[in-house]
């Protein structure tokens, strides 16, 4: 009997509609992007093809590009090694509580994720305000005046402050994902470990987390890609300030292509963005798959 | 559950039914004023309804977005050849010239717009290659607004006329816990305009930055280096709110309106501060303006006025109702100055009749304009390509955050100007 | 077999107490923005961004809410949002479910290629697609229509959603379909009766993510829509935007109103995370 998991008709039916939608909305813009990345177009009017000029300029002569990329990597590292572990621990605690309490808390934790980014940005701009914001006011009140900085405009603290805002906003999602993932862990698995004499900590590290590897892997890939694509929160808080110190790739490519009118150059950044993102994703997936074995 | 899903999907596919207009001519318009219940947006609505009453059978449909998305949408419409017929835009080289070069804007007959009271130079700003492409709507001048009560409370009885005098009042305000001055530092253009003005105050010659863009002089010349130094000191002197570089338009304006700052560096479009009900009556009664100070050893005088005609209206070259569109513009030009002045929305690009109940600040603005010995024209950042504007803004941000030296700043400007001139 | 020795009871209680405290502190910090937005929405626009943080105004401007509702055209825009977001969520979830299943549990020749295409779909920056898509969609008459907005909403969420389903399906027992197939069941039947219920946690995540992403989405709606009749909820907020400064307090009132359905939606869906797990007992 033919292997049913190889039924071509079924696969076609399952895959083609989705692919069609993707193709319709993404193939044309991607091709247009690639085309314009080889020109000196300014959005309007005449342009000429310039070969790899844009790419060479970006890679060798554009410190802002490299800073944007560096900031993105810092954000990814912070997300994976700071936000995710805390979110996981929270989700684990929630999963062991009573259903009702857990649902109330989970809803509360998710609230920032529901608010528009404009609210998040303005809120933190307010909190971080050096003169009126509650962060500095609290620091002054408890006598730590030396620590009261101009968080978003001081070159020393601007990047951590922006990264903090992004991490804070994404928390609800992370807890959400991990909680749902924890819900799929079969109870007997955990009980078997308990019976074998494992402590709670060991149960988690030796049994549950390895079981959840596909989920964790997915979350990390999503983290990497959303970090790369971060745009609105940065645009609304610092817009790269001070100078270009908090510039991120998503904002930079928008500025170059649409504000500065360097359409060709901006599209080259866009293409590089896609290549780097795909590359990073593949690396992460390979690493996760490697650890799975 | 399934039924609901299918119902929703079906609804999604239903095209929107739009009533067919019978023998109606519809003018499609666009602007960057989404709020139609207040200030400028409300005035346009009034003008539109008056126009429709005078031209029965005419319908007007307007698309409005805020500034940045509006500019993006116009670019998209232009590329897709779907521009609105009549739309609000800017006279700046950086914005209008690309549209003109692409043939998207209809040239206008200047004779049809003379005699409408335009201030000197207003129509010229909208003239490219000898042809008129848009009608100006507002006069923008750069001033310092101030709160009379806060000045009195700080014991300052004489307005600063030089920069040193301005710096001298800083400690007096700080002693009262008041921020001396605010402006929008998150967007770089206010500080960029100030840079132009400082160069003028130093060199005594108008449009120095324009000359540098024409490559008659260089940005690395001493006058600009000094202007950059002055600007850096201006920002570092303690005049401004501590987080100036991330403080956006709304936040800085509110600081002034709430009486937390004594001065506000901004343009004449804010003359409505005198009537803005969002602020206290006390504030409205006490707001006034004064001219930007001079440098003690600079060649410029206080009546060298940083002024330009920013906003305009243009007609798409693809319009099928050119005559009607022109009539609209003429009607707008007749009605707008009165309405705008009466509602304290902005300083029009045409002469206005002062009214007995004009606010103090409105009267002062008129006086500053009347006193002007010479005017600057469009600020440098908008006199060139969009790329120069972006480079200019980035460089300003870096200079004012103390990340680069004045010498490095002018070098960046010069390199960018050189590239722009080559285009 | 005796259970492992428990740590000292008092220490455990103290540990639980600390844990609860941490959770509560966290909860407060997450609720804080909602409180902040709400309090600001009751101020006058001129009083924002200054000292008035977290203080109940002595003169609450409830009129901001009535203005947000009427001048913000929230009924019309809200209905549009409901239709567009619901349709795109249903479509995106369904397509992602199908693709995710095929990738995770079937063997076929072009799989790697398709996975690559889907990965690329995840990383394309939205801004780069606006201008080309406007012209491309225009050729099909899709500009300024609801369907013309739904398609990109589906496209830009499809990749993430597929990924989530793939991750979830990979964990299901290998021989799951065999029994049903041996019984002669067809693929659609298997997917609907066996797989879909097990995929419920993933479906919940996907549905919530897609809905929330598109609920607050503005830039694509701004690009592809022109008529006022079709505009979605985020446009309510810009109706209070002036050329330079805006009516901030009313905008905040808009944002509170817009956030409420989203919270309700999350509440509704999170119930369903409980139900549905793999072969094995459910967690509570």
Image: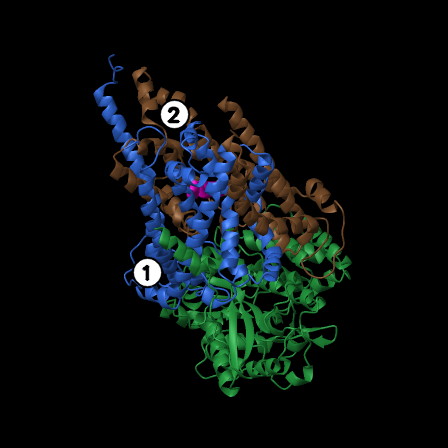
Q: The chain drawn brown is chain what?
A: A
In blue, which chain? C
Q: Are marks 1 and 2 on the same chain?
A: no
Q: Which residue is mark 1?
A: C42
Residue displayed at 75% across by 62% down = B214
- Is disc 2 placed on a helix, strand or loop? helix
The residues tagged by marks 1 and 2 sit, at their Cα atoms, a distance apart of 47 Å
The disc placed on residue A208 is: 2
User: Which tint was used for chain B?
Assistant: green
Q: Which stretch is magenta?
A: A161-170
**Residue A168 part of the magenta segment:** yes
Residue A70 vertical placement versus B153 (above, below): above
Q: Chain of mark 1?
A: C
Left or right of A61 in this view: B27:
left
The color scheme shown is by chain
Query: Relative to the observer, which residue lies in front, C47 or A279?
Result: A279
Q: Chain of mark 2?
A: A
- Name the residue located 58 percent from the left edge and 39 percent from the top edge: C114
Work out whether B223 lies above or below C180.
below
Viewer-proximal residue among B221 and A188: A188
Q: How far across and down, in percent of the image, does residue A261 sit?
A: 66, 56
Image coords of residue B273 (percent x, y): 45, 69
């Amino acid at each position: 009997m033919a292997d049913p998991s190889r039924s071509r008709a079924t696969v076609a039916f399952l895959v083609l509609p989705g692919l069609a939608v993707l193709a319709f909305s993404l193939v044309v813009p991607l091709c247009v992007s690639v085309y314009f990345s080889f020109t000196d177009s300014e959005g309007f009017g005449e342009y000429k093809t310039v070969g790899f000029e844009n790419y060479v300029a970006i890679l060798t002569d554009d410190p802002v590009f490299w800073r944007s990329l560096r900031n993105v990597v810092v954000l990814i590292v912070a997300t994976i090694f700071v936000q995710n572990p805390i979110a996981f621990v929270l989700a684990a605690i929630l999963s062991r509580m009573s259903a009702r309490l857990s649902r109330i808390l989970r809803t509360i934790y998710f609230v920032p994720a529901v608010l528009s980014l404009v609210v998040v940005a303005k809120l933190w701009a307010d909190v971080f305000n050096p003169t009126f914001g509650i962060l500095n006011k609290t620091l002054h009140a408890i006598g730590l005046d030396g620590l009261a900085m101009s968080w978003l405009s001081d070159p020393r603290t601007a990047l951590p402050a922006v990264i903090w805002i992004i991490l804070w906003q994404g928390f609800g999602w992370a807890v959400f994902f991990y909680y749902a993932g924890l819900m799929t862990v079969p109870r007997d698995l955990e009980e078997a470990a308990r019976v074998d004499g494992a402590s709670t900590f060991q149960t988690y590290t030796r049994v549950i987390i390895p079981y959840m590897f596909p989920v964790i892997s997915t979350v990390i890939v999503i983290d990497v890609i959303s970090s790369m694509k971060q745009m609105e929160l940065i645009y609304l808080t610092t817009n790269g300030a001070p100078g270009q110190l908090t510039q991120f790739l998503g904002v930079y490519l928008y500025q170059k292509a649409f504000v500065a009118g360097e359409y060709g150059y901006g599209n080259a950044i866009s293409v590089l963005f896609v290549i780097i993102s795909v590359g990073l994703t593949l690396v992460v997936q390979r690493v996760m798959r490697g650890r799975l074995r | 559950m399934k039924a609901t899903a299918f119902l929703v999907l079906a609804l999604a596919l239903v095209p929107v039914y739009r009533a067919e207009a019978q023998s109606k001519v519809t003018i499609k318009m666009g602007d960057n004023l989404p709020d139609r219940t207040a200030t400028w947006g409300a005035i346009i609505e009034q003008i539109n309804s008056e126009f429709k009453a005078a031209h029965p059978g005419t319908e007007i449909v307007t698309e409005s977005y805020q500034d940045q998305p509006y500019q993006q949408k116009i670019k998209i419409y232009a590329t897709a050849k779907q521009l609105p017929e009549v739309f609000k835009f800017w006279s700046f080289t950086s914005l209008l010239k690309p549209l003109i070069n692409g043939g998207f804007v209809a040239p206008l007959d200047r004779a049809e717009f003379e005699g409408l009271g335009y201030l000197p130079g207003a129509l010229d700003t909208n003239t490219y290659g000898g042809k008129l492409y848009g009608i100006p709507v507002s006069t923008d001048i750069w001033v310092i607004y101030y709160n009379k009560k806060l000045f009195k409370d700080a014991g300052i009885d004489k307005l600063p006329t030089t920069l040193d005098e301005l710096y001298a009042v800083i400690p007096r305000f700080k002693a009262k816990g008041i921020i001396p001055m605010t402006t929008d530092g998150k967007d770089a253009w206010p500080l960029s305009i100030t840079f132009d003005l400082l160069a003028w105050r130093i060199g005594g010659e108008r449009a120095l930055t324009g000359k540098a863009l024409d490559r008659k002089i260089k940005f690395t010349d001493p006058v600009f280096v000094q202007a950059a130094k002055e600007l850096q000191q201006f920002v570092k002197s303690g005049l401004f709110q501590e987080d100036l570089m991330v403080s956006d338009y709304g936040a800085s304006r509110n600081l002034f309106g709430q009486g937390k700052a004594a001065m506000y560096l901004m343009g004449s479009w804010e003359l409505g501060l005198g009537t803005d009900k969002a602020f206290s009556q006390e504030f409205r009664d006490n707001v006034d303006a004064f001219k930007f100070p001079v440098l003690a050893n600079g060649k410029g005088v206080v009546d060298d006025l940083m002024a330009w005609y920013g906003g305009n209206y243009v007609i798409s070259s693809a319009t099928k109702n050119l005559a009607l569109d022109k009539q609209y513009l003429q009607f707008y030009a007749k009605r707008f100055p009165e309405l705008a002045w009466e509602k304290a929305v902005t300083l029009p690009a045409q002469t206005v009749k002062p009214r007995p109940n004009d606010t103090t600040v409105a009267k002062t603005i008129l006086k500053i304009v009347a006193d002007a010995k010479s005017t600057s024209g469009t600020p440098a950042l908008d006199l060139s390509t969009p790329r120069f504007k972006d480079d200019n803004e980035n460089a300003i941000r870096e200079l004012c955050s103390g990340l680069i030296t004045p010498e490095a700043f002018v070098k960046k400007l010069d390199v960018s100007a050189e590239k722009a001139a080559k285009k | 077999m005796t259970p492992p020795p428990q740590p000292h009871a008092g220490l455990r209680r103290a540990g639980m107490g600390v844990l609860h405290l941490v959770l509560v502190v966290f909860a407060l910090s997450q609720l804080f923005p909602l409180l902040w937005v709400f309090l600001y929405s009751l101020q006058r626009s001129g009083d924002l961004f200054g000292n008035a943080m977290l203080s109940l105004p002595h003169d609450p401007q409830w009129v901001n809410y009535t203005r947000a509702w009427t001048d913000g055209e929230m009924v019309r825009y809200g209905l549009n949002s409901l239709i567009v977001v619901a349709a795109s969520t249903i479509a995106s979830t369904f397509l992602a479910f199908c693709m995710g299943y095929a990738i995770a549990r079937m063997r076929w020749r072009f799989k790697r290629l398709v996975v690559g295409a889907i990965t690329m779909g995840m990383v394309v920056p939205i801004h780069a697609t606006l201008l080309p898509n406007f012209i491309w969609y225009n050729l099909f008459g899709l500009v300024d229509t609801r369907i013309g907005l739904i398609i990109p909403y589906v496209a830009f969420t499809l990749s993430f959603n597929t990924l989530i389903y793939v991750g979830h399906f990979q964990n299901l027992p290998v021989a799951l379909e065999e029994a049903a197939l041996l019984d002669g069941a067809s693929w659609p039947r298997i997917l609907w009766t066996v797989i879909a219920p097990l995929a419920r946690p993933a479906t919940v995540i996907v549905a919530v993510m897609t809905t929330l992403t598109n609920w607050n989405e503005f830039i694509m709606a701004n690009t592809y829509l022109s008529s006022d009749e079709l505009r979605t909820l985020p446009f309510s907020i810009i109706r209070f935007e002036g050329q330079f400064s805006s009516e901030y307090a009313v905008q905040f009132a808009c944002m509170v109103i817009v956030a409420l359905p989203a919270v309700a939606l999350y509440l509704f869906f999170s119930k369903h995370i409980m139900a549905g797990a793999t072969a094995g007992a459910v967690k509570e």
